Image (tube, grey):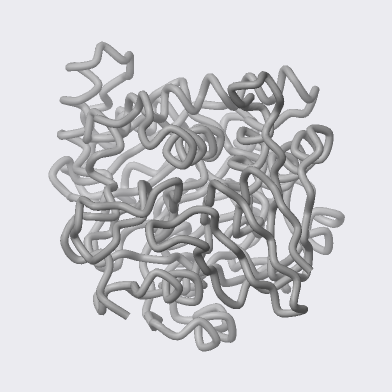
Amino acid sequence: MTQNFDVVVVGGGTIGLSAAYHASCRKNQQGTNYSVALVEQFDLDNNQNSSKGYERMYRILYAPENRARLVESAYAMWHQMESYTGTQILAEHPMLFFGKPTSSTFEGSLQAIANTMDALGIPYDYLDSPSAIAKEFNMFNPDGMPSDYAGLRQNMGATILVQPSFKAFEGLASDNGVSFFRNSEATSISRKGTEGPPYVVNLADGTQVQAQYLIMAPGIWLNEILKSFDLKAASSWSIWTMTLGYFNTGSAFRDNLPVWYEFGDPDNGLFYGFQPTGQGPENIISEYPYAVKVSADFTNNKTNNVTTALNTPPDPAILSDITNRLNKLFQPGTFSSTTALSGSAAACNYSMNGDGDMVIGMVPKTPESTSYWPNASIFCMASGRGFKFTPLWGRVLVDLAIDGETSYQNDIGPFSPSRPGVFETA
């Protein structure tokens, strides 16, 4: 059976839901809203996709100017979502980046970030020493930091509340008439014409979903979708299984704890944590309502096999690294638990391009080509950094599929699917 729509979105994580919602808001030349279908291989509320979990970090502190501009737009759109739905999505509190000024991550070094903030006129406070960091945030122990540590404090920081944001996009999409194909695996995508549209998404149960415009947000299952376009992720692509745990905060400092990220050794010294928001696994938050997620931004487990990634447990060695770092970095009493709370350890999977950056754009006909399949856009290899852009990426994916371009074209250029090392021939 074939069902016809104007737009079909493959992938029902938050990015896919955002795209479906934004597509349903668009009107065609006759003034009628586009009909939209969203296809998801699991139920929308599942523990497999990249939208699982409870919190993500919002910050504007980026070294590349295009990212800072884009995330400013996303910030406004998050607030628009809150206003429209009456749901809190951003738990706002100060952001602290700190560490070695020249230690580089995918976002750049602290010094490069400060330079970009200066160039764009975005306010922040520079904390020039461990003692200055501890003076601003008294839960930090300056003796637990190298003497050359510095920090950037920025007020426009927040914890993105994942599940409320997911439900907000799902509700808006549903209210706008988006048709959900849940528990419906897309086995292939075929084309009616040699040049592309309409596209037909073939489901495992034999249903065909046909649409003029195709948007794909496939997460770590990208190769299952790309094969229909004779593409696959380049050999440098991998899935990083990251380890996290929840730690209970003590009463002395919890109200002033920032969202924080430590720029230590790039190989094994990148850690980050959140401020209490009351969000987290029910078995943890019900007993410890002020518990916070803390994670390492490095891993010992990388693979290009989806099944292996999904079955990789939290790494006890990294949990030990997190505990040891917290005990040195923070004053006694900041955390009332010296180890991760029992049952709170978890793993999440980052889809990582070889250069560590996201991929968003039109679908190239061949690797590195600037000739694209008409009316087809894709977001993949989010690299653990895509969530903060969710409302904006949904709009951009719709722009690209329907119009073939977006007003954000220049700023998304570095994320192009046509850049070297992203795709190979399947």
Quadrant in the picture for residue 413:
top left
Q: Is residue 327 left or right of residue 152?
A: right
The correct choice, above or below, for 369 with respect to 344 in the image is above
At 36% from the left and 33% from the top, the residue drawn is 405
Q: In the rendered view of the protein, which quadrant contains the C terminus?
A: bottom left
Q: Is residue 257 left or right of residue 321?
A: right
Q: In the rendered view of the protein, which quadrant contains the N terminus?
A: bottom right
Task: Find the residue positioned furthest to the front.
Answer: 193
The answer to whether residue 114 is visible is yes
The total of numbered circles placed on residues is: 0
At 35% from the left and 52% from the top, the residue drawn is 358
Quadrant in the picture for residue 36:
top right
Where in the figure is residue 208, as x and y percent of width and height? 70, 67
Q: Is residue 131 left or right of residue 48?
A: left
Where in the figure is residue 77, as x and y percent of width and height? 56, 23
At 52% from the left and 69% from the top, the residue drawn is 190
Where in the figure is residue 199, as x and y percent of width and height? 54, 58
At 78% from the left and 25% from the top, the residue drawn is 85
Nearer the observer, 59 or 404: 404
Quadrant in the picture for residue 22:
top right
The correct choice, above or below, for 355 with respect to 332 in the image is below
The answer to whether residue 345 is visible is no
Nearer the observer, 287 or 391: 391
Nearer the observer, 331 or 312: 312
Q: Is residue 213 left or right of residue 280?
A: left
The correct choice, above or below, for 405 with respect to 284 in the image is above
Where in the figure is residue 132, as x and y percent of width and height? 30, 28
